[in-house]
Amino acid sequence: MLNIAIDGPAGAGKSTIAKLLAKKYDITYLDTGAMYRGAAYHCILNGVSPNDTNGVERLLPNLDMDVVYEDGVQRVFVSKKDVTPYLRSLDMSIAASDVSKIPSVRVKLVEIQREIAYKRDCVLDGRDIGSYVLPEASIKFYLTAREKTRARRRYLEFLEKNVETTEEKVLRDMQARDKQDTTRDFAPLKVMPDAIVIDSTDLTIEDVIEIMSERIDAVISC
Ligand code: DC
């Protein structure tokens, strides 16, 4: 089984790279962040703040989440409804980070993630893939970039989607989220000793793919 783990902070390019690797190696791309976003969406829809641990825990047994693949593209269903189009907003990013601090939420979502990863070759991106979801992953990458570069990339993505925001707001939200994701008690984002660290600040997407592919090919040929 081939499991490629890509962890790193927001805006490092994890999902762009993971999608391209999935295509290149003809394997599944599991976007675990979308699952935390789906959990946050479920809370908000039910009038519960993603920060309200007791409220979220009460709601958790009713969280019915399915991750399905349509033409190779991941869709997240909550209560049988495809919520994928609602998950990428700035507000939902922060809400996902909030809800992801709650251990019982993580346990529930990690179970689904492992179920998928144990059954098929895949590349997974997130914050705790190499440290907690799949400590035995075939290969682990930690993808990062300078903070301002990451914020700029995210801002340009929002501009492209005609979302009104400012680069300063994107940077502030990103800093808050990174702080929360790296300092939470349960399965925080961290660099694992066996992870290959790639700083993409001065690299193109193609450069990153080339560096990762060399390492992945070496693992495959072993
Ligand atoms: O990767 P993303 O930006 O879609 O993730 C949204 C939030 O979900 C992120 O700020 C923290 C949380 N998350 C997590 O805690 N663990 C993961 N494996 C993936 C995401």
Image (spheres, rainbow, N blue to C red):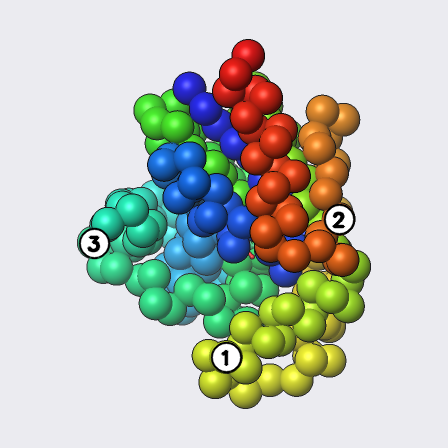
Corner quadrant of residue 211: top right
**Residue carrying label 3:** 80
Rendered residue at 50%/46% (across/down):
18
Q: Amino acid at mark 1?
A: Glu
**What is the distance, in whole Å, between disc 1 and disc 3 at their CAs?**
30 Å
Check the picture and name the quadrant holding the N terminus: top left
Rendered residue at 63%/60% (across/down):
11
Residue 88 drawn at (x, y percent): 46, 66
Q: Is mark 2 within 8 Å of ligand 1?
A: no
Along the horizontal axis of the image, is 28 left or right of 152?
A: left
Is there a contact, CB below 8 Å, between mark 1 and mark 2?
no
Q: Is mark 3 within 8 Å of ligand 1?
A: no
Along the horizontal axis of the image, is 59 left or right of 189?
A: left
**Residue carrying label 1:** 160
- Disc 2 on helix, strand or loop? strand
**What is the distance, in whole Å, between disc 1 and disc 2 at their CAs?**
24 Å
Q: Upstream in the sequence, badge 1 or badge 2?
A: 1
| Residue 26 appears in the figure | yes
Which residue extends farthest left? 80
Residue 199 is labelled as: 2
| Residue 109 appears in the figure | no
Q: Amino acid at mark 2?
A: Asp
Which residue extends farthest top? 222
